[in-house]
Amino acid sequence: MRKTTTFAVAAGAALALVLTGCGSSTETGTAAPAGQQGKDGGSGGLASPFSDALKLADASKQGAEKAKSAKMSMDMAGQGKAEGSMRFDGENSAMTMTMDSPQGATEMRYVDKTLYMKVPAAQAKQFGSDKPWLKISPDATDPLSQTFSKTMAQSTQQSDPTQILDQVSKAGQITGADQVELNGEKVNHYKVELDVSKSMEANAKGMPAEVQSQMKKMLEGKNIKIPAEIWIDKDQLPVQITMDQSEMMKQIGGAAGQNAGAAGKITVKYTDWGKPVDVTAPPADQVADFGEMMKKMGR
C-alpha cells in the first residue's frame, strides 16, 4: 500500500500541473477601466477586456489553436517549482515537465498517449525496479494505471492554458477586468471565480466510476469557490495565470488541509507561444512497466 501511495502522490502532483495551470501572486501596474478603450485603445493593438466569460474563452481558444504550443514555469508557493513545454493538438498532444519538490525531482513525459514518470530514486526502489522510468500505458488493466492514463489523456488533450477560461465560462464568472503592464507589455488582467463542484463534475467525465464517486463525496455539501487571476496579451493568449486553492484544500483535505496556507497558491507563466515542442519517449531499456508492477503486487 505504501508503494502505491508513494507513486500516487508523485504522479498526482505532476498531473495537477496539467489539470490546472493556475496560481496566486499578483503583478502591479497602472490599470485602465474595462471597456473604456477602443479596439487598439492606444495600447499597441490590445483590445478592451471582455466582460463576458464565454466570449473571452472563445477568443483565447482561437489564439491557442493557431499557436498550438508554449513553454511554462510554475511556482507552487514554497512546495516546489516546475518547468515544461506543451503541444496541444488533440490526440497528438504531448508534454514534458520537470518538477522540483522537497522529496526530489520528478520528470514526466507524455507522448503517443503514454505517460512516463521518472520519480526520485528512493521512490523508484520501493517498486523493486532498478530502472529510472515508470511507464503507464493506455491499455494497462490495473485501476491505478487506468486512472492516471485516462486522466492524462483527457487533460493533455485539453492542456492548453485557455482551458481554464473555458472552465470559467461554464463553471464560474469574471469578477473584474482592467488593463495593466506585465513584464513591459500591456495586457488585459482578469479576476475570475471558479465553482469547484461544477468544474470537478466537468473534469470527471470519462474517469472511472470509482474516481467520480470519490470526487463527488469529497465535495458533497460544500460550496467552494476558487479565486483566480489571468493576464491575456494582444493575441488573446494567456501569459500568466494564478489561482488560490487554499480554501478548497482546507475544506476537502481534512487535518492536513487545515494547514494548507500558502501551499494552495500557484503561479504559472507562459512564454514562447507557437515555438515547436518535440517530446520523445525514454530509451526502452530504461523503462519499467508500472502496470506489470501492479500485477505482481496483486493490484
Image (cartoon, rainbow, N blue to C red):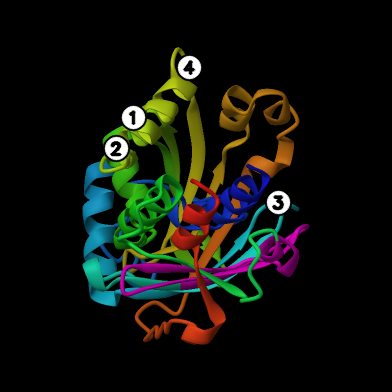
Under mark 1, the amino acid is: Lys
Disc 1: which residue: 198
Residue furthest to the top in view is 221
**Label 4, label 1: how many angstroms apart (C-alpha)?**
11 Å
Residue 99 can be seen in this image: yes
Q: Is residue 93 above or below residue 208?
A: below
Contact flag, marks 1 and 2 (Cβ < 8 Å):
yes
Write down the region rendered in magenta: 96-125
In the rendered image, residue 246, in percent from the top left (x then y), is placed at 63, 34
Mark 1 burial class by Cα count in 10 Å: few <14, some 14-19, many 20+: some
Q: Nearer the viewer, residue 193 or 209?
A: 209
Q: Nearer the viewer, residue 288 or 29?
A: 288
Marks 2 and 3: which is nearer the front? 2
Mark 2 or mark 3: whose residue is earlier in sequence: 3
- Residue at the image point whose x is 37% and y is 86% from the top: 276
Mark 2 burial class by Cα count in 10 Å: few <14, some 14-19, many 20+: few
Disc 2: which residue: 202
Disc 4: which residue: 222
Asked where in the image residue 278 lies, by quadrant, the reply is bottom left
